[in-house]
Amino acid sequence: MSGRAQLMWDEAVTGYDFGPEHPMDPVRLELTRSLVGALGLDRDMEVVRAKPAGESTLRLVHREDYVAAVKAASADPAAADQAYGLGTMDDPAFVGMHEVSSVIAGLSVGAAEAVWRGDALHAVNFAGGLHHAMPGGASGFCIYNDASLAIARLLELGAERVAYVDVDVHHGDGVQAAFWEDPRVLTISLHEHPRTLFPQTGWPEETGAGAGEGSAVNVALPAGTGDAGWLRAFHAVVPELIADFRPDVLVTQHGADTHFEDPLAHLAVSLDAQRAVQVACHELAHEYAGGKWVALGGGGYAVVEVVPRSWAHLVGIAAGREVAPETVIPESWRAEVFARTRQLAPVRMSDGRWPVEWGEWEAGYDPADRLDQAVLATRRAVFPLRGLLA
């Protein structure tokens, strides 16, 4: 097993571009890669390109007719079939859509392969985490579900248990759907409550079906949840389930749209809390999965202020070069940001909230508190199904 981490990167991913008015601006990927380099985080990592996901790989998750529809829309966007979620306001069709989506999927699949085969202990694809795409349709800015494809590839290679932890502000509905009846995959999603945010799924009662009953876990957080509540919910649910499941590999999705500056959601989480959860995921991988960790990006629409810093922290943690929160960001990167976006870049790798404090669940809970109610709902729905005390 190589202890070296891999950064999955191909400049082609910046072609995942729904147009100038769309919130998913690919500049967030370019600026993240640039900040990783400016901080020197890639010096101890192998930067790897991977083969685009081919037809047989895509069909591990996606239906043949859907892949054909994406290819057709990619060649002629005007002919996009909206029955497949293509050519919509959320997922506009564009020339080359299939090709660039296959690149992103291939990077996540390549990350999974590298970790499983021992070429790397950790692998990061911050261009990935496109967790809303369904087996038969595009959804929520996502064409191919690279997270599901990475998990499916791990199963194909022989993994018996894969845990997926999703801390994007939106429910990881596509990954949940892909493995709804599969007991080999434990999906855990912490997200803003479906009453107030797309995709209106991810209720605590969604626990899987058939042999997979109890393998889907959803923590639906009240709008306005901040650092202390977010971390309390994470630690009240995730570590105990991972300890019980003991996955062969841990796959995590780190959408940065939980941040208080994100324009598309309503949580109030800081960069410092996001970093704390990244550190926790890294520790869980080492404690329960032999260190095997595949880390993905996801949502995040504060494309200058938040996303590059959040994912640079993720890369640093995976590389064994954690960036101290008080680190001053190199002036060269800040100048690049202004030149590209005419926005002023942040000065430090922190929102000034480090260390983040939160209350341990084991110390007691308040049944009248909305955050604690959300945690209780999840524990009561899922934990007994897994033989754990709610």
Image: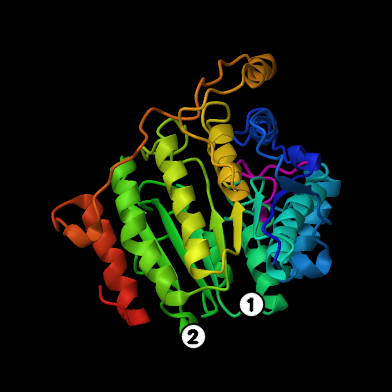
The residue that disc 2 covers is 211
Colour mapping: rainbow
* 384 over 332 or under it: above or below: below
Which quarter of the rendering shows the C terminus?
bottom left
Residue displayed at 65% across by 15% down: 335
| Distance between mark 1 and mark 2 Cα atoms | 17 Å
Query: Is residue 145 visible in the rendered structure shown here?
Result: no
Q: Residue at x 29, y 44 (%)?
A: 228
Residue 316 visible? yes
Q: Is residue 148 left or right of residue 242?
A: right
| Label annotation for residue 159 | 1
Which three-letter amino acid code belongs to the residue tagged 2?
A: Ala
Please give the range of residues in magenta. Answer: 82-94
Q: Name which quarter of the figure residue 384 lies in.
A: bottom left
- Depicted 360 relative to depicted 344: above or below: below
> Which secondary structure type mostly characterizes the magenta part of the structure?
loop
Which residue reaches farthest bottom? 211
Q: Badge 1 local density, few (<14 within 10 Å), some, or many (20+)? A: some
Foreground label between 1 and 2: 1
Is 300 a magenta residue? no
Q: Which mark is residue 135?
A: none
Secondary structure type for disc 1? loop
Could you tell me residue 11's position as x and y percent? Answer: 79, 39
Report the front residue among 4 and 289. 4
Question: In the image, is residue 85 part of the stretch drawn in magenta?
Answer: yes
Tell me: 98 left or right of 235. right
